[in-house]
Image: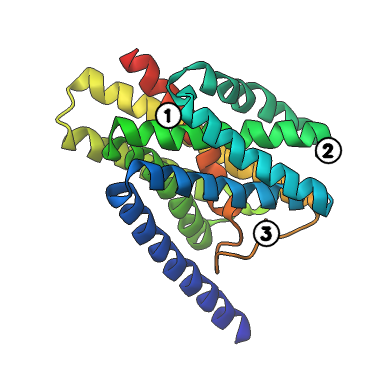
């Protein structure tokens, strides 16, 4: 009888933490002035950088340096208006579409210190820039990009718990199932239809929205699987323990790392 109680407790913590995060995100997105929003993005990336250093087993000095340089880089890049350049996100697009599938298929190990720093920046900096750029373009746009990943993640979690039978990637993440992925895909399709209906999209607009949502959904799965692979290689269950029921910051933003830069790139191309 203990296992169901533990599962129920875990789910409760996950839901409570998720609701708290949602409230904090909404408050920050709608109420924070631009300097405070930049500070929050820097803080988020610093926390994620610390967990990345933990996964790659950096020493104390290297870990602190990596966090400091990461926070400084995102601040300098933001003040230099780099977030408005498509090139800031093209590297992320290439990484997620070309390199990550090979990485997962061939089970490459985690890199050493120098390459680990570069890979960490490739993961974190475009996502941080996208948070700044998308919010400046409109709070609704940023919330839509964040919501897409959140909807996919939540739907996959609950559909997987309810119907999961067939493993999606057992060597990488035994807990993820095809049923969860299908549930997430259905949820994303409905999400795209709701957004399209809200903005009174015509047929062409709706098809484009569904196609973009489908691409971002696939990327969200890649982001989730890549972080799971990194944790598996590092021999840890979670990237951290700061978020009850969710683990660490990287555990919560893994899919966003892939989705946000490409969402920013698509918006830049659409309005360039």
Q: Nearer the viewer, residue 162 or 239?
A: 239
Going by the image, does 66 lie left or right of 154? right
Residue at left offset 64%, top offset 43%: 225
The N terminus, quarter of image: bottom right
Q: Which colour scheme is used?
A: rainbow
> Outermost residue toward the left?
200
| Sequence-first tag of 1 and 3 | 3
Residue under label 3, please give it.
238
* Label 2: element kind: helix
Q: Which of marks 3 and 2 is in front?
A: 2
* Label 3: element kind: loop
Whether residue 80 is visible: yes
Q: Which of 112 and 188 is in front in this view?
A: 112
Residue under label 2, please give it.
113
| Sequence-first tag of 1 and 2 | 2
Residue at left offset 67%, top offset 39%: 69
Residue at left offset 52%, top offset 23%: 89
Tell me the quarter of the picture where residue 165 sits.
bottom right
Place of residue 90 in the rendered image (x, y in percent of width and height, measured from the top left)? 55, 19
Place of residue 259 in the rendered image (x, y in percent of width and height, measured from the top left)? 48, 35
How crowded pointer 2 is (Cα within 10 Å; few <14, some 14-19, many 20+) is rated as: some
Place of residue 230 in the rendered image (x, y in percent of width and height, measured from the top left)? 73, 45
Going by the image, does 264 lie left or right of 247? left
Q: Which of marks 1 and 2 is in front?
A: 2
Q: Marks 3/2: CA distance?
A: 21 Å
Residue under label 1, please give it.
263
């Amino acid at each position: 009888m203990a296992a169901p109680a533990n599962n129920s407790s875990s789910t409760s913590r996950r839901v409570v933490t998720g609701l708290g995060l949602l409230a904090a995100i909404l408050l920050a997105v709608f109420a924070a002035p631009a300097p405070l929003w930049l500070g929050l993005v820097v803080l988020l990336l610093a926390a994620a950088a610390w967990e990345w250093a933990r996964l790659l087993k950096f020493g104390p000095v290297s870990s602190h340096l990596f966090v400091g340089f990461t926070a400084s880089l995102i601040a300098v890049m933001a003040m230099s208006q780099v977030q408005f350049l498509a090139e800031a996100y093209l590297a992320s697009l290439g990484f997620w579409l070309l390199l990550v599938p090979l990485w997962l298929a061939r089970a490459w190990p985690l890199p050493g210190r120098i390459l680990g720093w570069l890979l960490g920046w490739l993961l974190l900096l475009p996502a941080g820039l996208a948070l700044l750029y998308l919010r400046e373009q409109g709070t609704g746009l940023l919330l839509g990009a964040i919501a897409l990943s959140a909807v996919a993640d939540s739907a996959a979690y609950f559909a997987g718990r309810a119907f999961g039978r067939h493993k999606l990637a057992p060597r990488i993440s035994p807990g993820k199932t095809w049923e969860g992925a299908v549930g997430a895909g259905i949820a994303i399709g409905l999400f795209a239809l709701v957004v399209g209906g809200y903005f009174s999209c015509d047929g062409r607009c709706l098809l484009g929205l569904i196609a973009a949502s489908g691409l971002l959904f696939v990327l969200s799965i890649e982001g989730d699987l890549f972080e799971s692979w990194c944790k598996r290689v590092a021999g840890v269950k979670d990237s951290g323990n700061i978020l009850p029921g969710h683990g660490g910051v990287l555990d919560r933003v893994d899919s966003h790392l892939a989705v946000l830069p490409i969402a920013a790139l698509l918006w830049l191309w659409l309005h360039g």
